[in-house]
Image (tube, helix red, strand yellow):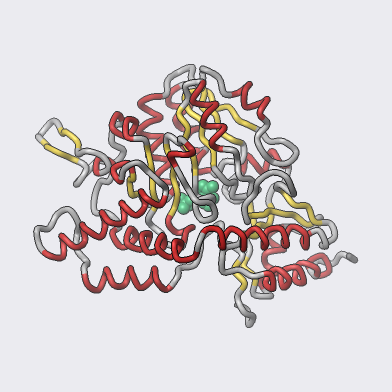
C-alpha cells in the first residue's frame, strides 16, 4: 500500500478472507453450483445439503437450540430490519417505549426510529458512564414495564465497550421487554452463546468474521419467529399460493424469500471452521495483548484522546481517538501514506458522536492476524501527524 507493507487496522469494518474460505467458495461454485430447495437433480440436492449444513454449523457456533431458529440474510443490517419490520410493526404499539443504547450503529437505530414513528411509540436512550458503559441506575429508570423492546450491540463499533448483555437481558425480561442483540462486532471476538445471553434476537454479518460479504444471520427464539409475519414475499417462503391468498412456509424458510446466497453460507461455514481451528482462548489472549499495548502506546501521542474504556470495563479490540487540531480524515490519510489502513468518520453512529461532542474520530480495530510490530509502525506514523499539519508538537 503506497509502497509499504499493508497494515490493516480496519477489521471492525470488514475482515480479510482466509484461503480456506476462498477455497470452500470456489469448490462450491466449481462443483455444486445450483439453486437449492428447487432441483430434484444431483447438483440441486448437493447445493441444498451444503446450504443446510451451513445453517447447522451456524446454529452450533452461536449455540442456538435449533437450526430452524437461524435465518440467513444479507447482513446484520437486513437482520435488524427484518426484526423491526416484522416483529416491531406487528408487536409494538402506541404508548410503548423502545429503548436503545446511545452507542448503537445506525443499523440498530434507524429501523427503530421508523417503527416508533409508524406506531406512535417513544424512543428512549441509555447513555453511558464515564468509563463508557451502562449506568445501572439509569437502566432501571429507563427500562420499565412500558418498554416493549430493547436494542443493544454486544460490543460498540466505536468505543469497543463490551456491554453486560446477560444482566441487561435479565432485567429487560423482568420488565416484559424483548431484547435484540447486535452481535456484529462481538461475534468475531467473543464466543457466542445465544442461550446463555437469553437473547430474543441476535444478529451478525459474515464479512466481519472472515466470511464473504452478502451473508448474515438472524437468530430468533422459535416462539417469536413463528408468530411473526414474513418480511419479504416471493418464492421459497410460501406453502400454498392461490389467486387471493397465501399460506407461508415454516421457519426458517418463511423469512428467506427468493434464491439464497449459497456460496455466502458455504463461506460462512468455512469461516466458522477456520475460527475453530484457531482456538478462542489463543485468539482472545492475542487480541487482548494487542489492545492493551495499543492503549498504552497511544498515550504517548501528544494531544490524543481515546473514546472508550481505558481500564476496568470489559472492552474489545476496537478503539476510537482524536488528535487535537487534526481532522480524523487527515489522520487516516497521513497514516495511509505509511501503508496503514484505519477508519475515520462517524462510524455510522452519529447520535453517539453528538453525545461524545466529537463530530468524527479515527478508529483502529484488530484481528487475529495483527501484530505488536504493526502497532509500533502506527505509533511512529501518528507521532508525525501534527507536524505534517503544521503544529510544533
Ligand atoms: C455494531 C454494528 N452493527 C451493525 C453493523 C452493520 O453491519 P453490516 O453493514 O454488515 O450490515 C455494523 C457494521 O459496521 C456494526 O459495527
Left or right of 51 on screen, residue 114? right
Give x and y (percent) for residue 95: 49, 17
Q: On screen, 11 above or below 203?
A: below
Q: In percent of the image, x 52 and y 31: which residue is there?
A: 169
Q: Residue at x 56, y 57 (%)?
A: 12
Give the camera-side residue of 360 and 230: 230
Q: Nearer the viewer, residue 307 or 113?
A: 307
Image: 45 above or below 90:
below
Q: Quadrant where the N terminus lies?
A: bottom right
Q: Quadrant of residue 326?
A: bottom right
Marker count (numbered):
0
Residue 269 shows up from this direction:
yes
Question: To which quarter of the image does residue 378 belong?
Answer: bottom right
Image quarter (top left, top right, bottom left or bottom right) of the C terminus = bottom right
Query: Where residue 362 appears, x then y in whole percent?
Result: 68, 57
Residue at the bottom extreme of this rendering: 3
Residue 321, percent across and down? 72, 54
- Does residue 212 appear anywhere in the picture? no
Most distant residue in the right direction: 392
Compared across the picture, whether 315 is left or right of 91 comes to right
Residue 196 x, y percent position in the rendering: 47, 39
Viewer-proximal residue among 5 and 202: 202
Above-or-below relation of 64 to 99: below
The residue at 62%/72% (across/down) is 7
Amino acid at each position: 500500500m503506497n509502497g509499504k507493507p499493508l497494515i490493516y487496522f480496519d477489521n471492525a469494518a470488514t475482515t480479510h478472507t482466509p484461503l480456506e474460505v476462498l477455497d470452500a467458495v470456489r469448490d462450491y461454485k466449481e462443483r455444486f453450483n445450483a439453486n437449492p430447495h428447487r432441483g430434484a437433480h444431483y447438483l440441486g440436492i448437493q447445493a441444498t445439503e451444503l446450504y443446510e449444513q451451513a445453517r447447522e454449523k451456524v446454529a452450533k457456533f452461536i449455540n442456538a437450540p435449533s437450526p430452524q431458529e437461524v435465518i440467513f440474510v444479507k447482513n446484520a443490517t437486513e437482520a435488524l430490519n427484518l426484526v423491526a419490520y416484522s416483529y416491531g410493526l406487528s408487536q409494538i404499539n402506541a404508548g410503548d417505549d423502545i429503548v436503545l443504547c446511545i452507542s448503537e450503529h445506525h443499523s440498530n437505530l434507524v429501523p427503530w426510529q421508523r417503527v416508533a414513528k409508524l406506531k406512535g411509540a417513544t424512543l428512549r436512550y441509555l447513555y453511558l458512564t464515564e468509563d463508557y458503559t451502562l449506568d445501572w441506575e439509569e437502566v432501571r429508570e429507563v427500562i420499565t414495564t412500558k418498554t416493549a423492546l430493547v436494542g443493544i450491540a454486544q460490543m460498540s463499533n466505536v468505543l469497543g465497550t463490551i456491554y453486560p448483555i446477560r444482566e441487561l437481558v435479565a432485567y429487560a425480561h423482568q420488565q416484559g421487554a424483548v431484547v435484540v442483540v447486535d452481535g456484529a462486532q462481538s461475534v468475531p471476538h467473543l464466543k457466542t452463546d445465544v442461550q446463555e445471553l437469553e437473547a430474543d434476537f441476535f444478529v451478525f454479518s459474515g464479512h466481519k468474521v472472515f466470511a464473504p460479504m452478502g451473508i448474515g444471520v438472524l437468530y430468533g427464539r422459535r416462539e417469536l419467529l413463528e408468530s411473526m409475519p414474513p418480511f419479504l414475499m416471493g418464492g421459497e417462503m410460501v406453502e400454498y399460493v392461490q389467486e387471493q391468498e397465501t399460506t407461508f412456509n415454516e421457519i426458517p424458510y418463511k423469512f428467506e424469500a427468493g434464491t439464497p446466497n449459497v456460496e455466502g453460507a458455504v463461506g460462512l461455514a468455512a469461516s466458522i471452521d477456520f475460527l475453530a481451528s484457531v482456538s478462542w482462548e489463543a485468539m482472545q489472549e492475542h487480541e487482548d495483548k494487542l489492545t492493551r499495548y495499543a492503549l498504552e502506546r497511544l498515550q504517548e501521542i501528544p494531544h490524543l484522546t481515546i473514546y472508550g474504556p481505558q481500564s476496568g470495563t470489559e472492552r474489545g479490540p476496537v478503539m476510537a481517538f482524536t488528535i487535537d487540531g487534526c481532522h480524523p480524515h487527515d489522520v487516516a490519510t497521513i497514516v495511509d501514506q505509511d501503508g496503514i489502513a484505519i477508519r475515520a468518520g462517524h462510524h455510522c453512529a452519529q447520535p453517539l458522536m453528538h453525545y461524545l461532542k466529537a463530530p468524527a474520530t479515527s478508529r483502529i480495530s484488530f484481528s487475529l492476524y495483527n501484530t505488536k510490530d504493526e502497532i509500533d509502525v502506527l505509533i511512529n506514523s501518528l507521532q508525525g501527524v501534527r507536524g505534517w499539519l503544521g503544529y510544533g508538537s
